[in-house]
Amino acid sequence: MPQLEGKTVVITGGAKHLGKAIALAAARAGARVAFTYLHSAQEAEHTLAEIKQTGAQAMALKCDVRDGRSITQAFSVITKQLPQIDVLVNNAGAYEDVLFPDVTEEQWDNMFATNVRGPFLVSKYCIPAVRAAKGKIINIGSLGGEKPWATHAHYCASKAALHMLTRVMAKSLAPDIAVNCVAPGMLSYGESDPSLTRKFAEMTPMRRNGTADDVVNAVMYLTTAPHFITGQVLVVDGGLGLR
């Protein structure tokens, strides 16, 4: 596990699932951790307690990454207590399964507001604090940003935009800030449809679906990777995208 002793890691959407796993991994690696949540207040409380059990300094704040005012309010609290941000992980995101002809304008706009506008606004606000640390920004993309999925037009398009935003940010913020993206493939959580997970496991060269740990390991690598690694989209999919 890369060591983050004395570093500050901020994760958006860190109350549950992948965001929680990243927050806990950062805490176990010695980092101070701050994470945001929106609708998952109860989960955020439990995650905060788990992080503090590791002995790490931690805080959780409600924040809607689609709203600039909400970002300003939440991150002003974070930066007052943790003036230097060594790693920002833009994890908060939306996912939806809808056939292209059935996608509504509202669904399209909300997907882009969460998956593209959110990382843009949060990163923009955090640039001074991350630049002061000569730190890292890590966006959480998706294999769907590289592959066209018929039932995920708005999701795939938003993640493709996030992948390109990663590359643009890497050029714009160099040499002070390294910006990369981790793009997971099919991940299995406890509530996943067993028949669907079996189907994707059979399609994957590694013969299994991804876990949160697979993605967390990639994120943790990038937190301490050489600054010379920037503008990359690291796909973590067991080879699923090779089909």
Image (cartoon, grey):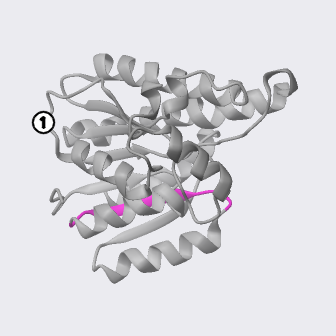
Q: Residue at x 38, y 49 (%)?
A: 215
| Residue density around tag 1, few if under 14, some if 14–19, many if 20 or more, within 10 Å | few
**Relative image position of residue 140 (x, y in whole percent):** 45, 39
**Relative image position of residue 240 (x, y in whole percent):** 46, 34
Please report the bounds of the magenta region as a residue range: 30-39
* On screen, residue 232 above or below 123: above
Taking the magenta stretch, the answer to whether it contains residue 190 is: no
Q: Residue at x 58, y 30 (%)?
A: 117
Q: Most prominent secondary structure in the magenta stretch?
A: strand
Judge by depth and name the residue closer to the eye, 148 or 2: 148
The N terminus - image quarter: bottom left
What residue does disc 1 label? Answer: 226
Judge by depth and name the residue closer to the eye, 189 or 44: 189
Judge by depth and name the residue closer to the eye, 78 or 54: 54
Name the quadrant containing residue 30.
bottom left
**Relative image position of residue 13 (x, y in whole percent):** 53, 53
Q: Is residue 211 visible?
A: yes
Judge by depth and name the residue closer to the eye, 60 or 3: 3
Q: Residue at x 24, y 31 (%)?
A: 177
**Relative image position of residue 210 (x, y in whole percent):** 44, 50
* On screen, residue 204 above or below 187: above
Amino acid type shown at disc 1: Pro
Q: Secondary structure at mark 1?
A: loop
Q: Residue at x 31, y 63 (%)?
A: 25
* On screen, residue 126 above or below 124: below
Name the quadrant containing residue 194.
bottom right
